[in-house]
Amino acid sequence: MARLILHNVCKQFSEQRVINNLNLSIEPGSFVALLGPSGCGKSTILRMLAGFEPVSSGEIRHGERCLSSEQQHVPTEARNFGMVFQSYALWPHMTVAENVGYPLKIKKIKGVEKEQRIKDALSVVELEDYANRLPSQLSGGQRQRVALARSLVTEPDVVLFDEPLANLDRHLRATMEATFRAFHKRTKATIVYVTHDQSEAMSLADHIAVLHKGQLVQWATPEELYNTPKNTWLANFIGRGSVLKVAAIEPLQYVKTDTLHQIVQMVNASAATSSILIRPHDIQFVEENVDALSVQVRTCIFRGERYDVELILNDGQALLAYSEYPMIEGSKHYVRLIQAWALEEDV
Amino acid sequence: MLIRSLDSQLRWLSLLLFLLIALISLLPSLRLLTEAVTSVSFTASSPLSDVLSSERTWRALKNSFYTSSLGTLIAVLLGSGFAFIVSLTNIRRRPLWVFCFMLPMMIPPQVTALSWLQLFGPASPLLNTFGIAPALGSANPMYSAEGIALLLGIQSAPLVFLALRTQLMNLPQDMVEAARMASASQFRIWIDIIVPLSRSALVAGAALAFVSSLGNFGIPAMLGIPINYLVLPTLIYQQMAGFGEDILSEVAGLSMIIALLVLAGMLLQQWLQQRSQYALIGHTTQPIFFDLKKARMPTEFALGMVLSFILVIPLIGLIISSFVPALGMPLNSNTFTLNAYVEMVSNQGSTARAFVNSGMLAFFTAMVLMLVCLPLGYLLMRLPMRVRSVVASLIEVPYAIPGIVLAIAFILLFAKPLPIINVSLYGTLGIIFLAYLSCFLSVCLKPVMTAMSLLDASLEEAAQLAGANSIQRLMHIILPLTAPAFFAGGLLVFLISINELTVSALLWSAGNETLGVLIFNLDESGDSVLASAISVLVVLLVASLMALLSLLAPRLPKGIIPWHD
């Protein structure tokens, strides 16, 4: 088991730079998600880790071993990594057992040991009874589980996941997430998981790297990412909430009620220099009093367990709040803001 | 970048392969070019100026243009008519119509010519059987410029049909539905939407038909040479047959003229196609579909009439001719004889030899090309897009230039013994074999490339992660998944080369005749009955090979087998 290190990694396709000076240190045995909107470069990073793409500059190391740099490039087949593809990439002319056993065949593992390891791998994903089926005879979820079994059969140190749930329906995703969690617990392999779905990343990973336009925006645990996002782009990207323009304030700190009301009310076009993030559950509806902010309801949408209410502040900025009761559109109310997180501006 | 991603075994293989391609695709054309260029000198008696000042050259050029243009017109009418009806309407038994209409393209031109010759004229066994043959001494109408053009048209109509059909099948149904919502009638939809959108395909098909007619040798040879009506390919043939290698540089000049004409035609086609190309947006899940309603039966009847005229009746004529003792006699219970078939299998040494020669040539050409195409296709897929298209068009060159020109190029290349080993290929089957390899490489490579490009890249990447090197990936993953395409490519090569005439007409020698040459020679020497019998066997062979390919169709990507959807 060794640490996976990306040091100043850059990637350029012809003139276009898709990855810019990326630094990451992935602990052995951790479950890491690369999260970002499409085109942010997350899949390119995964393909560089797998060895399909060489780095343009910088270095990828696995423990002491240099996998990829400007001078050298360890080819994919010599890396002993596993990978689960979005399209499953099962070979249609081989049975489930042959698919899973192919990496063993290449490593010249034969006989009883091969049979046993195929059986073990299939039991992890609960597909022992399907060994002799062809991939075309399986459902989408079963196919992805075969791909999972194939990626773990050689007990790789690192398993890469390339948007493995993108082709599955919502119900299956929840089941597969549980399978992935069990898989991680059992194999203790380092997992690098690419996704554009934040809830998937949040619920699976213990560390998330958020990427935007080839840059690492933040490297943090899911909780940190939700509570203390670094800048306005990330605050808009992760979770639900409102980013407000307010009077100048030091970034990356919590702002509590009194100061908060002050900077929200002080805002006008010339003084609006900072941004803050307010999560909906930090907004309380209160009776009219001097400390409260007056708001007007613009829309009220039923969401099942609660109502989403869009409020308009006096200066015209919008604020998302939750309510247990329906509210009449256009009606006036008063709110108290419990806390907000001060953000850095985007570069 | 490329070299980095290949391992060393593959690197050597790829170098070797690219060398091979350069040799068999570029060398012939380059040799022809040097011969033609070095013979350009500005004295009055240089071979090229002889060619250009000769009245025969200009007459042949004019004849070539006349027959090819008229032929193209016929091909466009036939091919587009069939394509619109078969692709866009609810006609029944669609695959059968397509198969029958594609058959003329696959039947060798000398057989087509022979069957039409047997159809008309005072000696026609078919007309004599029904007692309606014209008086003795009257001319066979097929021996004329228009006869040549008609057969050129029928032979190349499938090219127009194919080009148009592919386009029509890709027109999304929702475009027609949108027009219907705008309350356009079926006729208006056809005029306003379908015709403009398929114009580029029609132009491309017409250009292909013209180019292939220009290079056709079998038809003008069988129909034109007897009445001394020469087109460019037959002029070259006659010069070579009459004077041999002494006039090679003159013939090289003539070949360059055809090659340039063909090249100009292809460039014109590309230019026209680019000008009238629309990007199609929308789903192509359901192709456009018109309901013929009550007109369905009459339409099917009309199609059947046309097909029986261009395909069935000539073939019947051919079959009848093979069962009579001699031309000019009617077929009835007294005259019916299997003599020609008996003669074919027993006495005629040259017949058996031609079958063996053509069979071996076709078999080994197909085998070698299949073996070459596996690594070649794989390597080409890994090249950057731009390099790949350049290499692909280089491979296309020997197939695109007319067979007669390629044959001249091969004579120029191999007329002298090979250096160092001092072996002469000229006058052996070897030279024909090499010419076939060069000519049909693209025929075999195309289906393979199509199949490989449709393969999800992650299938190979998954094998790479499993630790497989390039050779292992090729054998374990790529080959099993694209095997049907390889087989189809090989069968197509076999099908085309077993009937080939144009290249072998100039390259054959005594003892090394091919089937195509045999039919041609038998007909020239007046033994049409035997020629018909052999042709009947050839048609049977072609039809059964095509049927075999059709059986393979469900396992192949769309578009590999021309007569299948």
Image (cartoon, coloured by chain):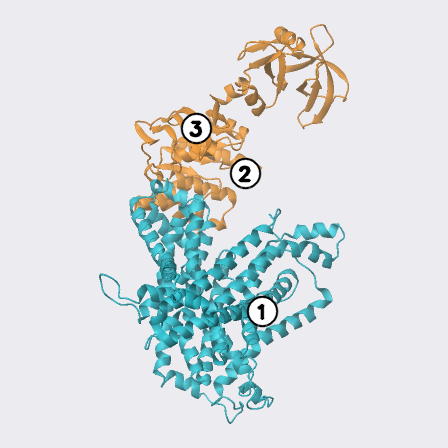
Chain colours: A orange, B cyan
Q: Amino acid at mark 1?
A: Leu
Q: Amino acid at mark 3?
A: Phe
Q: Looking at the picture, tell me which residue is in the foreground, A31 or A219.
A: A219
Residues tagged 3 and 2 counted as in contact (Cβ below 8 A)? no
Placement of A245 over or under B282, stated as above or below: above
**Residue drawn at point x = 32 percent, y = 48 percent:** B10
> In the image, residue B142 lies at what x, y percent?
55, 79
Q: Residues within 10 Å of mark 2 (few under 14, many from 20)?
A: few
**Residue drawn at point x = 63 percent, y = 16 percent:** A244
Q: Is residue A181 in sight in this rendering?
A: no
Residue B70 tag number: 1
Q: Nearer the viewer, mark 3 or mark 2?
A: 3
Residue B8 tag number: none
Placement of A230 over or under B40, stated as above or below: above
Reading the image, the residue beneath label 3 is A31
Q: Looking at the picture, tell me which residue is in the foreground, A99 or A186.
A: A99
SS at mark 3? strand
